[in-house]
Amino acid sequence: MDQIPIEEMDRSDEQWQSIFDSVKAELDSSSDSKPTSNRPRLTPEQLAPFIDHTILKLDATEEQVDKLCEEAKHWHFAAICVRENFVARAKKSLQGTNIHIACVVGFHEGTQPTVFKLEEASRAIAAGATELDMVLNRDLLKQKQYAAVYEELKAMRDVVPEPVELKLILETSELDKAEVVYASVLAGYAGWDYIKTSSGFCGRGASVEDVRLMKQLASILGKTQSKEMKVKASGGIRSFKDAMDMIVFGANRIGASAGVAMMEEAVEKSK
Ligand SMILES: O=C[C@H](O)COP(=O)(O)O
């Protein structure tokens, strides 16, 4: 893939299209990715750091968020994932632990004006969020307004400096393969940390094919960008087997409301 440093780009829709074409060509010429791990299954201790323990339903209660945090501490999950209104509460509950607090932004449509998303992100970080899971504006992507999508992602990266991790929710059930490529390229060029499959509120949720494709894209983009993006699989991942299917194809995180059930299965299987 030809490397065009971002500073040398005019960032027009046409120039983005030519970068997409070169990534697609590389994707087509690369061999299909194989499972990244031959491990038949992970132990509970190995599985826990993959899990973003999630509650995003609109009628979630304070008690449910408290329980979510207690479960995250008990199982040593990587993160909890909540809406903005619960971030401060989760921060109190998770004080003194290294469990991350992920907050969703632009949830779950992604079409909110950029300024709203930036304000929401800033409030979440001020309240204690250490990771943000933002929904892509796929309407703009589908209208081929690639420059506008990039500008939103770049503005978010500028407002949210590292080490806060930014995850872009693609909502893969609503995209064709080419659109997954476009969204991933734009996220990579904007310096995002993760591409994430789904919100859990739209369409089919994550598939192994999504993870496989996104992992390949992350690897291709990682050759020309300063870091390689990670992949978060989320939406409809209910069982230990579902989680393992995603992990063997390279998922770095599993976003799920069924994290405890997965852990209990993992414990059973490890006996
Ligand atoms: O980001 C995480 C998803 O909202 C979780 O979806 P789920 O309830 O289908 O596990």
Image (tube, helix red, strand yellow):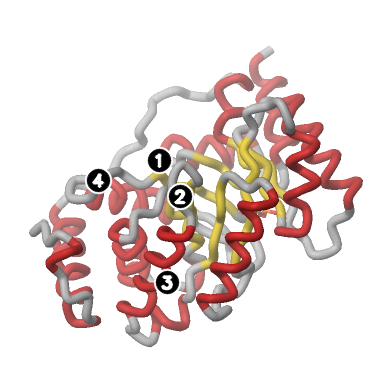
Q: CA distance from mark 4 to mark 2?
A: 26 Å
Q: Quadrant of ligand 1?
A: bottom right
Of the 4 image quadrants, the one containing the N terminus is bottom left
Of helix, strand and loop, which one carries label 3? helix
Q: Would you say the residues marked 1 and 2 are in contact, meaning their CB atoms lie under 8 Å apart?
A: yes
Q: CA distance from mark 3 to mark 2?
A: 28 Å
Of the 4 image quadrants, the one containing the C terminus is top right
Q: Give the image location of residue 6, x and y in percent.
A: 19, 63
Badge 1 density bin: few <14, some 14–19, many ≥20, Cα 10 Å: many
Residue annotated with mark 3: 152
* Disc nearer the start of the sequence (1/2): 2
Residue annotated with mark 4: 226
Say which of 158 and 246 sits in front: 158
Q: Would you say the residues marked 4 and 2 are in contact, meaning their CB atoms lie under 8 Å apart?
A: no
User: Quick check: can you spot residue 236?
Assistant: no
Specify the amino acid type for callout 4. Ser
Q: CA distance from mark 1 to mark 3?
A: 29 Å
* Disc nearer the start of the sequence (1/3): 3
Q: Residue at x 76, y 25 (%)?
A: 74
Residue annotated with mark 2: 208
